[in-house]
Amino acid sequence: MGRTSLDSLVTFVSVARAGSISAAAADLGSTQSTVSDQISSLERSLGFRLFERSSRGVVLTTRGRQLMARVGAQIDAAVSAVEATRGEPAARETILLGGPAEFVSEVVLPHVTRVAPDLTLRVEFGEAEPLLETLTTGGLDVMISAIQPRVAGVEFRPFFDEQFVLLMTPDRAEDFATRPETVPLLAYAEELPIIRRYWRTVFRRRPTDLTIAAVVPDLRVLGALAAQGRGMTVLPHYLAEPYLRSGRLVDPVQPPDPPLNTLYVARRRARPGRAPRTDRLAELVDEAARVFSDRVD
């Protein structure tokens, strides 16, 4: 067996987490050919294959998984120690977080910034699919997704169930009780994704007889408009709760089984040295959801 270098093991860990040579090269600031050569050299040195190659990327072999289990954490610690010794600039410590603006702003950031003021964050808001693409190409470390992010190189787990609530002012609720179609609709998008889901689940039909009064791609603004009496809207419970508690808005339906939407915390399999920091942020996101749920229950 030949001599194994730290650089080759760093490359191995990065490829194993990224799930592809190209993604690992981007993480490492290297080229695909260099990364591929390093992996081939490491395999020759060890005397066995580490990855199975395919058109979709690479997958660890059984012995590759065994090696990853043994060296992954140690390589993270070694890289972090070297960076600390070199006095790496603060920008290297920045963790990149993405997700829906409302949930990140109202639930996640207040908790994270309170309990971890030393954590340097850069936050990007947006829809799940474009953010997921940013995550896979290295532009994000952790994201909150409303869809299951089944993509190579991305780990995910469910962590929060949004409960949707139909909201309107008390006087609008009186109109809704007799003629629902007379209450204008405040929607997040022209396609009515949240409204359609609510109507199908609760009323077992499509919302075809409603008049749209406003389309605003911010759920917080929709809540404010509804509180002004402009119409009805559907919000997740974490945004609806303050309005319901104050009585400014009411839920005229209160279904026994309200529609739910599962949120996932997803993380790119971090390049060596970043895993402990992305682990910490993912744990803080979980913690923020638990703290919020305990507060409103």
Image (cartoon, rainbow, N blue to C red):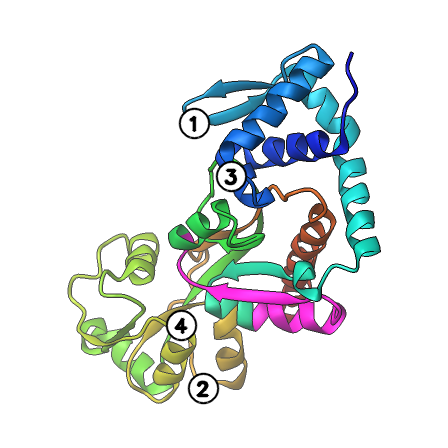
**Amino acid at dot 1:** Arg
Looking at the picture, does residue 215 appear above or below residue 248?
above
Q: Which dot, 3 or 4, sits closer to the camera?
A: 3
**Amino acid at dot 4:** Leu
User: What residue range appears in magenta?
Assistant: 106-128
Return the residue at label 2: 248
- The local secondary structure at tag 4 comes to helix
Looking at the picture, does residue 122 appear above or below residue 44?
below
Pointers 4 and 1 in contact (CB under 8 A)?
Answer: no
Return the residue at label 1: 56
Q: Position of residue 64 (x, y in %)?
A: 67, 20
- Numbered circle sitting on residue 219: 4
Q: Earlier in the sequence, mark 2 or mark 3?
A: 3
**Amino acid at dot 3:** Ala
Judged left or right of residue 187, residue 63 is right
State how far apart marks 2 and 3 are (Cα): 49 Å
**Residue at 64% across / 20% down in the picture?**
41
Q: Is residue 66 magenta?
A: no
- The local secondary structure at tag 1 comes to loop
Q: Position of residue 9 (x, y in %)?
A: 71, 30
**Residue at 52% across / 25% down in the picture?**
58
Q: Earlier in the sequence, mark 4 or mark 2?
A: 4
- Numbered circle sitting on residue 23: 3
Q: Which dot, 2 or 1, sits closer to the camera?
A: 1
